[in-house]
Image (spheres, grey):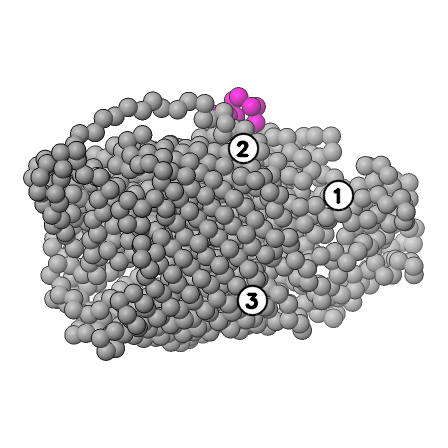
Amino acid sequence: MHIGLTATDRQDLAWEPSRVTPRLTSQMLNRLALALAIAFLAEPALAQSPPRAVSGTVVDADSRAPIPNARLSLNQALTTTDVAGRFTLPVPAGRITVLVEAAGYFPLAADLTVPEGGLSGTELAIARDTGFATSVAVTAPTPAAAPATAVVAPVAVLRTPGALDNVFRTLQTLPGVAATEEFGSRLAVRGGSPDQNLTVMDGVEIHDPYRLFGLTSAFNPETIERFELSTGGFSVLYGDRLSSLLVVENRDGTRSQALAGSASLSITDTNLVLEGKLPGKAVGSWLVTGRRTYYDLVAAPLTGQQFPGFADLQAKGVWEAAPGRTLTVFGLRSRQDAAITIDEDDARGEFQDDTENDLAWARFDASVGARGQSHTVIGYSDTRSTFGVDASFENTSRRSNAPREESYGTANVVFNRALSVKDLSLRQEFVFALGSHVLETGVEVHDLSTSLRFEIDGDRNPGAANGSSQQGGAGLPDLLDSSQQSTRAGAWFQDTFPVGSRGSLQAGMRLDRPGTTGELLFSPRLSGSLSVSAATRIKAAVGLYTQSPGYEKLAQGDYVLDFSSETALRSERATQASAGVARDLPGGVAIKVEGYYKDFTDLLIGQLETETARRARVARYDFPGNLQSSIPVAPLITTLPTNDGRGQSYGFDVFLSRTSPPAGAKLSGWTSYTWGRTTRDAYGRRYDFEYDRRHAFTMVAAYRFTPRWELAATVRAASGFPRTAPLGVRVAAIEDTADRDGDGVTDEVLPDRDAIGRLIYEVNFGSVANLNQARLPVFARVDLRATWRPRGAAGRWELYAEIINLLNRENAGALDPRLEYDPTADQPRIVEERDQSIPRLPTVGVRFRF
């Protein structure tokens, strides 16, 4: 494959050696927009005329989230809701009774009066079953959820402007959640790092939840029942992460039709979902879905350029073998590939990025007596990724102080990385309702096989201030080839019970034994809720959390650590506390105010060079006396791990939402404000954490002008992340293997010079004392979407047009230091340019269900 790239593109790709995927810049996104414009030249014709009917939405009575695949019936008339919970049911005029049924919910018989013209805008709310079979009598209260828990309906993912059908981009609009970069999907949650987030799908841990360089996710919103994010204080049912928990539940296929489905086309991929009931007398359903990028197929022949792509195939089957006995099987296969060849005057090289994900699990649900239930899940996941670079290009952060462009240095990047994570897991859960108590207990075991190999033969990245940075830090070794075989086990017990008539408590204990450390870890957790009135609730939670060392976590991290070293390591720990108050307001509006505090201990960081290693490195510099100040004498951060890190995070947020407005209301959405402070204690100093964000405001709003037309917008503004700013320039060094200075030594480092003898300079970021002492500029972005439903909310078609970054604001995910000629001095000057920003990007999409 061949594609033309600018110098900025090449640097962004080359300096992401250990991350699973490279960054993409605005120039590359502009090319992607061109490809999308070509791919969307044709639109389908639309025509439909519905009969007299009842139409509306089926929602969860508690969360008010739309419920897909709910079954509505009246005599012989039958229909099911779509992914947005919408339905249209042909009915006669007059008084009728509609039966509403959905998996996991109690049935509802709704009495309606239908006028001659039909009835629209009907909202039918059904109550969630606690998950027990019909033979189980549950009298205990609903478990007290932690205060920092948000349920995201799949329809919100599909309709949030700027989300691109990606749940992680929708989660970025919630309080306490920050995107680590504008293009990708990694999250920093309430002072945590991306590797501290746990993602679980149907009880199985997901190690690589991203696709297409983070532009989209591994989860297809068309096939998801719900997303639930806990930004802190999650229960003892899950462990081995410090910051957040994302629970993803796949929905079952429809049981009302032999064949149904939907199709969609968006900026990232085309998507087909097929589903139906099991054949014959078997009770259950099946669902098959496939996604694939399309622009690489459509635009490549027309533009002469190729683009990265991915494809995945997913299937789920559910069989009710007997009352209270259900077997579910699931499989997912995903492939991503990207190959770029550069052949230009000032650059030449190749980039290759391949990722493979395979996942399979089987689940058996069974009633245990009259008051209990068992859930058994056996899963296997296999994630493999390779990334290689062999390129040389102009390095704008390294040059002599000469007016000509050829004064820039050359970066030679030769790098190969391979990451593998294999996880064979077993999870057994038991739930019992005993009097007013709900008791939950279980065990989980993970047989993990992980490996990391990377080899660097070329230059390091001078812009990486931390030596262990995934972006080519100076402390990375030439070769790291490490693997781990370990068994991680956990067990838990939890009791949920009422306190008086208005309160409830959830108390639990978790026991973990990670094979990588051999520790026995106890994590007590407690949460409670109190209904002050019918409209006001208070919730609080406190608990201990642990996270064991492992390459399966570092895959989402920012730094490289070598776990093959003989250093005895401990699990990272965090003590968390949070409290909040929620109140329901008139008009379907709800408001929540929450505060949180986290104390991190035993955090894994890279060790500083030993004094012996530092002296040996510095001794190789053969610089004259007047250039001694350019020698980097401060110790570098290495990849050898240590538990010497600590940290604190605290703050509060306000969340105002109207996600399920009353019938006839035109405005819906949510808005939030978060204030937070996060620090780290390491290397003998306290400094702001990489993702410390003091202020963040988000608003997602949709206005329905008519049943056919809707306009929505996402508005975000936030203070910039901390960054390490350049302190100035220093003389660049070059390895002397040819005795350039004639002193007979061939294992030394000399001052670098250009072709006519001028000194070459590079950016100087100083020592660890300079880490994160500056800030990036304020981030702000507006995304706008217009949606047209030709037959209203109950119709089969939905078309939308969207503009990402409507105002074309050039945000700064980083400030790239560029050296420019300075005629007034003997050294070049530093000019910082904004980088890693998404440009204005128009998109269109279409969805159809059948």
Q: Are marks 3 and 1 in contact (CB under 8 Å)?
A: no
Q: Quadrant of residue 844?
A: top left
Residue 436: in sight, yes or no? yes
Q: Residue at x 12, y 58 (%)?
A: 134
Q: Residue at x 38, y 42 (%)?
A: 703
Residue 447: in sight, yes or no? no
Front position in the image: 220 or 657? 657
Amino acid tagged 3: Arg
**Residue 93: x, y in percent?**
10, 36
Q: Residue at x 64, y 30 (%)?
A: 4
Front position in the image: 225 or 351? 225
Q: Going from the N terminus, do you reach mark 3 or mark 2 first?
A: 2
| Spatial CA span between label 1 and label 2 | 25 Å
Q: Going from the N terminus, do you reach mark 3 or mark 1 first?
A: 1
Q: Going from the N terminus, do you reach mark 1 or mark 2 first?
A: 2
Quadrant the C terminus occupies:
top left
Amino acid tagged 2: Leu
Specify start and end residues of the magenta stretch as a single range.
298-305
Question: Is residue 646 magenta-colored?
Answer: no
The residue at which mark 2 appears reads as 32
**Residue 268: x, y in percent?**
45, 37
Left or right position of 351 against 39: right
Amino acid tagged 1: Thr
Q: Please tell me how crowded label 3 is: few (under 14), some (14-19), or many (20+) other residues with Cα within 10 Å.
A: some
The residue at which mark 3 appears reads as 677
Which SS class for mark 2?
helix
**Residue 827: x, y in percent?**
86, 49
| Spatial CA span between label 3 and label 2 | 37 Å
The residue at which mark 1 appears reads as 396
Q: Residue at x 20, y 37 (%)?
A: 88
